[in-house]
Amino acid sequence: MSNWFHRNPLKATSRVKFDLGKGATNISARGICRDLADKRAELLKLICDPAVDPKAVLTRLQVYISLLAGFVTPPEGSGESESKLRSTVPFKWTDSVLPKHTQPLMVYDAQFEVCSMLFSVALWLTKHAAKVASSEEVSPEEAVDVYRSLRQAAGIFVLLKDQQVSKLSTPPAEGHDLYCDALETYINQCIAEAQEVTIGRAIELKHDPSLIAGLAKATSESYKKAALALSASNSKVVGKWLKYLQFKQFCYEACMEIYFAEELLKADKVGPAIAVMGAADIAYKKAVDAGKHYGSADGIGLSSKMAEHCFFRRLGQLVKTTRDKLERENGLIYHQKVPVTAPDCDLAAKFGLAEPLDPEIDFTPCEQWKEGYKGFDLDKILESVASRNKDKNKSKEKLDRDEPVETPAEKPIFSTDKDPKNQSGCVIS
């Protein structure tokens, strides 16, 4: 099932020691710097494993953000609107969508660290969903985990797009992770993938065709929005990702037409239903084409053969069997004329639509900052930085800005090669 999901790699970053030298003048200030370095390293190590419980990751994220918040927002009662520490520490991050050899961004802005870490955890949540969905049989509880994780990821991407990125000292450039088009793509992709869980469930429980058609229509439209947002980016960089989104768009467009045709059959409108199956066949062929081009497209991603996935093979069979059934019924019973133009699916999903889940993240500086903030002397921090820059050739210890970027040691996600024993072909149902 994981090959059914396209996943970009985690952002790489360098180690940050938060060493402000003599500028941290009291125990609380030095404790904050020490804790920040430790908690950051712990969180980065944790998200290398997609099998970890999301609660553990989100708890560690909150602890780190609460510590880091004092570098962005001063504690209450300080009389300052912006933290005096905001530009004292450099942060280096790569972009998940750019090639590994691309030069990382180094920014002296703690808000850049906030946004980059939020993004990394959101991307990890999508990987966790893919990991849980990669087993042979997924329990109802695991399906809920996948669904919730994707909604949580969407919620964090929305938070970044609507609130956090605008606070950066320098706006992100086009083509980077935090640029609005990239975030819009991730939001729509997460919502669409969450709705795939709902559709699989609806098919297995044999819900009304109108409900399934409406959900498939909404899912196809979400993938279309994601692809549209990504289409302005460099195809040499995001070509594989774009083909994945288009593949999914056409898959669920075909799914929509199939169940719309079933709904028309219920209303004894077999002629129009046959015309609709013509549209389903066109959408399916577009999906076949996008799937073939995914493996050879430029950009980061697996060289998987998506068209060989069980769900897609069963989708092709469903197109054929549904069309054959309708033509048989029309020939034996209805004798209706098949219109040249297929009617548009006007069904809208009233239930089952996924929405971003608002993240419960508090950006208020933690209690340590009440005493700690007073203990940071900006003049002494600048003196320490200048002194270490002057003597850096004499010392073997690297400064934060000289630390190399380390590629995350991500644990791989292996998908099952066995077909699920259900009707939809979805591992999740």
Image: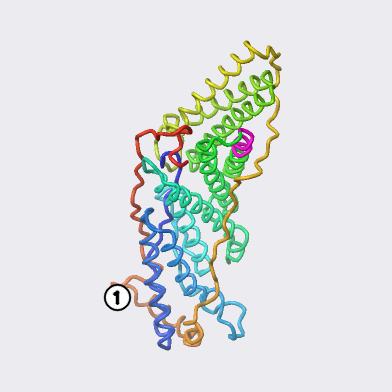
Query: Which of the 4 image quarters holds residue 82?
Result: bottom right
Task: Look at mark 1 in the image and give the residue it sits on.
Answer: 394
Residue name at image x 52 percent, y 38 percent: 205
Residue name at image x 64 percent, y 34 percent: 210
- Residue 212 shown in magenta: yes
Query: Is residue 136 rendered to the left or right of residue 262?
Result: left
Q: Position of residue 88 (x, y in %)?
A: 48, 75
- Give the residue type that dot 1 points to: Lys
Query: Is residue 89 rendered to the left or right of residue 336?
Result: left
Q: Where is residue 202 in the image (x, y as percent from the top left)?
A: 54, 39
Q: Position of residue 359 (x, y in %)?
A: 55, 62
Residue stretch rendered in magenta on the structure? 209-217
Q: Is mark 1 on a helix, strand or loop?
A: loop
Residue name at image x 41 percent, y 78 percent: 33
Label 1: few (<14), some or many (≥20) within 10 Å?
Answer: few
Q: Position of residue 213 (x, y in %)?
A: 62, 34
Residue name at image x 51 percent, y 53 percent: 148
- Residue 250 shown in magenta: no
